[in-house]
Image (cartoon, coloured by chain):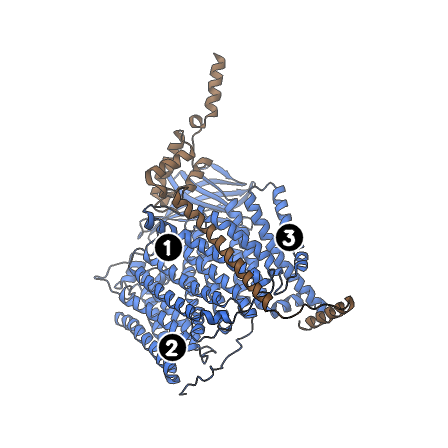
Chain colours: A blue, B brown
Amino acid sequence: MYVIGNIALYLGIVIAAYSLLANIIGMIKKDNRWLESARGGVLSLLFVSSIAAALLLYLLGTSQFQFKYVATYTNETLPLIYKLSAFWAGNAGSLMLWAFLLCVYAAMVVFSKEKRNPMMPYVSSIMLVNILFFFTVMVLNANPFEMTGSIPPDGKGLNPMLQNPGMVVHPVTLYLGYVGLSVPFAFGIAALILKRMDAEWIKLTRRWTLTAWMFLTIGNIVGGWWAYLELGWGGYWAWDPVENASFLPWLTVSAFLHSVMIQERKNMLKTWNVSLIILSYILSLFGTFLVRSGILTSVHAFGDSNLGTYFLVFMSFMMLVSIYIVMTRYQLIKKESNQVESYFSKESSFLVNNLIFVAAAFAVFWGTMYPLISETLTGAKINVGAPYFNKVMAPIMLSLIVLMAVCPLIAWQKPAVDKFLKSMMWPLAVGAATGIILTVLGVKGIFAIIGLSSASFMLATHIQEFMRGTSARMKATKENPWKAAYRLTAKNQRRYGGYIVHIGIAVLAIGVISSQAYSKEVMKTVNKGESFTIGKYELTFNSLAERMKDGNGIVTADVDASYKGKSIGKIMPEKIFYETWPEPSSEVAIKTNLAEDLYVVVSSWESRDKVTFLVKVNPFVSWIWAGGIIMLAGTVFALFGGKPTLSRIPAIAGQKFKGR
Amino acid sequence: MKKMIAATIIILLAMPGFTAAYTYNSKEFTSIVKKLDMQGHADHELSTCSVKKVYYEEIIEMLNGGKSEEQVLQSYVNEYGQAALRTPGKDKSGLIAWGMPAAGFAGGAAIVALWIRKLKTKATAGSGIKTLEWESETEKQITEKVLDEERRKLF
């Protein structure tokens, strides 16, 4: 096993280096045989990385503790699903996953319908550089197939916080997002190298970018869901440096997905778009660097290791190469740019959209890195925690919501202010009515009310857009409303998929604003049989019981819960004491409905009869998860829409390849 | 004498430091806790974080000892520096931390505004097309109807 694993890793380096070389020779000599050989190399890499990944899964699943990685992250009693998910629990495994996904993406790209595209050897080469880096790092610094000095009878086990279904999904989807960004990045750079300044690379990579964005969205939301269930502090987003690192590329890719529409339609913002995708890709490497360098304290960090140096060097190299290529092509890009015809147009609104997204990314980046900057420059340690980010990001996100509310109503190219004002009336009225109703109902907090009103304004705009489109189609085709709505959206999946994503964001925003502004919390020490209240809930502590399961001690509190005097059943929060882990973990008990979550944690106890509970009532948290699901549905819908690429085969004039 | 006793009781009642025992659910306590950066397992709940327990007890003690929220926070800043708080302070370093996102946004907004202006100016200068003028309202209506009809065909 040891030999097979290590041969696979070394072969990964050799094949990646060979394929890269074959691509370079093929491109210089314009010889298709070399390019074909490089393509074969990519396929071989997929095979080799699959062998390595499958082997690691096998070792983890069968508890082969002679391997250091297996002994460090698993133990005998760990359920199989978590034994397997330990694949990405540590540095070496997560790098293996990254390399494997890169190989999958590279093979999919290289063997796609665009395989004859002249850009492909360049795309393939850029991805091969990435693959080469990951295999090299594994061999030099984080080998998942490293053996232990002596075989331990049992492993150390997996961090209890990672023993949650969310942790099976969250890292993989984030990696799929991070790695996915290498595809549009590679195409963008390839287009620049070939001086192809049209929007072809954008059309070719639209689905790839959207897929990467979708995975980043899933990764972030599932990460929040995991934190909410597992960490026991009642929140879902702590603005932890590593959370921020995964949010950064999401923001820049969101900006990119909007600005590419201008390039496609108007042949504008070419430098900007390629810069955005470079930035997104670099930020994905930056996230990995943050996790592995140990430069910032985070619950997600893998601990101190010198892997950060490797990533810093690689990140700097890729950044410098990208900047050099952009700079050398700048005049050419600029020469072919079009212009904006009106200040008040969709083009301008997309520029504002980009400004907000990038400003948000800058604010998050600044807040994340400032403790380090401050300590380096002044020697003074300071913290930039959640309250800072909440204050800084709230106005930025609010402006984004308002922009999302008005942007769909603005026309392309020409100013149509009258039409815009007319179409904005109804959604604006809905937003204003929301604010008035909330105020009349006695809801406090002016900023939260403004936020909720804006979200409902945005929601109303998009519903109106669906209704207007359906109504226009009904008039034109005499179809019934359902058929008209179906055909309308099916005819323009990209646009309406985007609208569905926007609706998801509005729903998510309602959840975030409400849960942040109107959450209630109580910490109460109660005796057996005693009751206490929080909001309209009453909780009665019945008993505290202990039991053993899979070698772990579990303490369960039995609590009766009622809402407005009506029983809503039992709540059983738990505290688990792991045999292999020094700290206990909390299993939160949650009663959830559309309006709010009752969130109960056993905090501590003096005796079986006296327990301290942390209880929270978090309004509209389920809307956050629902918003995420709607966003996912919208993205999938948009993914299957859109016209295929215009140019499948055309070779560059004068570029002839020999061979098959 | 009776008046003096009554006045003393009223004064004592009005001074929460003497009369009210603060708990983990007190508004002042939660406000302080939200501003303090608990090192260690900052985001864990009480039982899984021993450091947090110490902080909690200290804060309650200080509040019950008559210290105000600002005084409690300041005592931690005096002991651990600005790193005791979750947000930067009002010193030079803190102002840079708070001001930079706003400066970045303002700078970005200025660039975007100039950019749009530049692109728009170019468009105006480069445009040799005259604005179409309708000879009559009827002609305008007919053209609009034709265009609308064409658009419907696209459905």
At 69% from the left and 71% from the top, the residue drawn is B152
Q: Which comes before the other along the chain, label 1 or label 3? A: 1
Q: Please state which of residues A31 and A150 is positioned toward the viewer in this rendering.
A: A31
Q: Please state which of residues A146 and A406 is positioned toward the viewer in this rendering.
A: A406
Q: Answer yes or no: do the residues labelled 2 and 1 have beta carbons within 8 Å? A: no
Image quadrant occupied by the C terminus of chain A: bottom left
The picture places residue A468, in percent across and down from the top left corner, at 67, 62
- Which chain letter goes with mark 2? A
Real-space Cα separation, disc 2 to disc 3, in angstroms: 54 Å
Amino acid type at circle 1 is His
Residue A595 has which mark? none
Instruction: Tell me the crowding category of disc 1: few under 14, some 14 to 19, or many 20 or more residues within 10 angstroms, Cα based.
Output: few
Query: Mark 3 = which residue?
Result: A428
User: Same chain, marks 2 and 3?
Assistant: yes
At 50% from the left and 14% from the top, the residue drawn is B3
Q: Which comes before the other along the chain, label 2 or label 1? A: 2
Query: Mark 1 = which residue?
Result: A300
Amino acid type at circle 3 is Leu
- Which chain letter goes with mark 1? A
Residue A621 visible to an observer of this rendering: no
Q: Please state which of residues A584 and A47 is positioned toward the viewer in this rendering.
A: A47
Query: Mark 2 = which residue?
Result: A43
Q: Please state which of residues A384 and A303 is positioned toward the viewer in this rendering.
A: A384
The picture places residue B142, in percent across and down from the top left corner, at 76, 70
Q: Is residue A458 above or below residue B144?
A: above
Q: Is residue B139 left or right of residue A73?
A: right
Q: Which comes before the other along the chain, label 2 or label 3? A: 2
Q: Secondary structure at mark 3?
A: helix
